[in-house]
Amino acid sequence: MTSEQIFAIRDLSVLYKMWSSNIPDSEKIDVASMIDRIEAYNRAKAKANYNQNEVKDIINVKYKGIL
């Protein structure tokens, strides 16, 4: 598989399967790089969506009838 084909993959599950398979070291480096890029993007996206001022109500359904 060429580097361009590896960098076109956007599915982490496919990349993890490729990582665990027997592929040459040069392809393994490309796969690891792509995994790192996607995970960094997901972390940045989650951080941007996080609102520190948003407080969610904590509901304990086990004791809801008592209160």
Image (cartoon, rainbow, N blue to C red):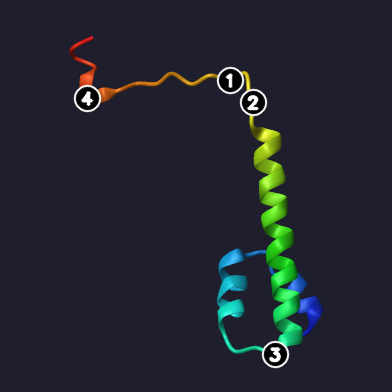
Location of mark 4 (residue): 62
Location of mark 1 (residue): 54
Whether 43 is drawn above or below 30: the answer is: above
**Residue visible at 34% across and 21% down in the picture:** 59
State which quarter of the image contains the N terminus.
bottom right
Relative side of 36 to 12, left or right: right
Q: Are marks 2 and 4 in contact (CB under 8 Å)?
A: no
From the top left corner, tell me how far across and down residue 20 is, in percent. Answer: 56, 80
Q: Are marks 2 and 1 in contact (CB under 8 Å)?
A: yes
From the top left corner, tell me how far across and down residue 11 is, in percent. Answer: 62, 65
Which residue type carries mark 1?
Glu
Q: Earlier in the sequence, mark 1 or mark 3?
A: 3
Q: Earlier in the sequence, mark 4 or mark 3?
A: 3
Mark 2 residue crowding within 10 angstroms, few (<14) / some (14–19) / many (20+): few
Res. 36 image quadrant: bottom right
Q: Residue furthest left?
A: 66
From the top left corner, tell me how far across and down residue 17 is, in percent. Answer: 55, 76
Location of mark 3 (residue): 24
Q: What kind of element bears circle 2?
A: loop
Q: Earlier in the sequence, mark 2 or mark 4?
A: 2
Res. 48 image quadrant: top right
Which residue type carries mark 2?
Asn
Relative side of 1 to 50, left or right: right
Res. 54 image quadrant: top right
Location of mark 2 (residue): 51
**Residue visible at 48% across and 21% down in the picture:** 56
Q: Nearer the viewer, residue 14 or 57?
A: 57
**Residue visible at 71% across and 53% down in the picture:** 40
> Can residue 1 be spotted in the picture?
no
